[in-house]
Image (cartoon, rainbow, N blue to C red):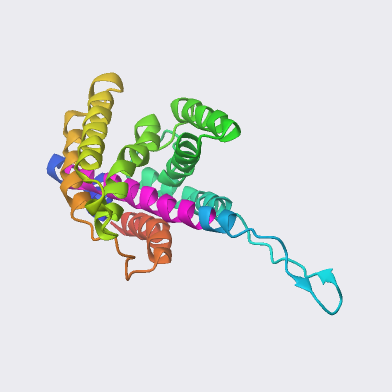
Amino acid sequence: MLVDHVGLVFFPRLAWVRMVGRVSMPLFAYAIATGYYFTARKQAALAAGSAPAPVDAAANAPQPRQRSFDPFLKYLLQMAAFALVSQWPFMLMRAAGRITSFGMSIGVTWLLALVMLHGVLSRRAGWLLAAIGAAALAMWLPIDYGIYGVLYPLACYPVVLAVQQRRRRYAELSSPAPLYLGGGAAQVGLNALGWVGLGFWPFQALSLAAFPLMCLDSGAKSRISKWFFYIFYPAHMLALWALAMLW
């Protein structure tokens, strides 16, 4: 991503620099899908653990039950805050790259992608309608990568399931191979849509180079805090803009 943005601001005519950056977006999409997987597991665990409130024998009255904030809504709010904080640096970087049109940062893309994931995977009527709304917004708003980006985490989700199945040794009961194949096919189809249907430049298909890296994921929690990436995204765009002003 950093190489891609350096190319955007300082070397717009060097196509190979932009090509390097094609791998970054799918890996972030995979990270979003992985984050949703663990959030959904936490949400399911909280729902399964909602037992009746304990009764105090002495007072013969139920004890107050501790309430937990919905993990998915927390994730959604974090992404909304990230999108809001990133918008101004994103616009400054685009201006430094001589792009004058209005655009919305990848934070908005990931926010809509989370709604899409939850709508499709939770199969709840309200969230399914929200997912349809997210798709409509992705095709109307000038967000980074458009509907292509909003659908990419969903295309990565089968690979997330396969990696977690392999890590937790569920493969003894069923093979993760169909999930890997499903995720690969979904990403190939999405890139074909991006190239033919949405008019993305041909080398956007280089994003498929990220697929083997997803499959090699250990499935373990990263040692790098997620907050590093939340901070790095707007910070590096501000730094590139500042350097462009001194260039």
The answer to whether residue 193 is visible is: yes
Quarter of the image for residue 67 reads: bottom right
Outermost bottom residue: 58
Outermost right residue: 59
Quarter of the image for residue 66 reads: bottom right
Identify which residue, 27 or 126, lies in the foreground.
126
The residue that appears at 42% across and 59% down in the rendered structure is 230
Image side of residue 231 versus residue 179, left or right: right
Is residue 27 rendered magenta in the image?
yes
The residue that appears at 49% across and 25% down in the rendered structure is 136
Tally of numbered tags: 0
Outermost top residue: 197
Identify which residue, 101 or 191, lies in the foreground.
191
Q: Which residues are magenta?
A: 18-43
Q: Picture coordinates of residue 112 (x, y %)? A: 48, 39
Vertical arrangement, residue 168 with respect to residue 79, above or below: below
Q: Picture coordinates of residue 167 (x, y %)? A: 26, 59
Identify which residue, 232 or 221, lies in the foreground.
221
Identify which residue, 86 or 109, lies in the foreground.
109
The residue that appears at 31% across and 37% down in the rendered structure is 155
Quadrant location, the C terminus = bottom left
Q: Picture coordinates of residue 246 (x, y %)? A: 32, 59
Is residue 157 rendered magenta in the image?
no
Q: Picture coordinates of residue 43 (x, y %)? A: 53, 54
| Predominant SS of the magenta segment | helix
Image side of residue 233 versus residue 86, left or right: left
The answer to whether residue 12 is visible is: no
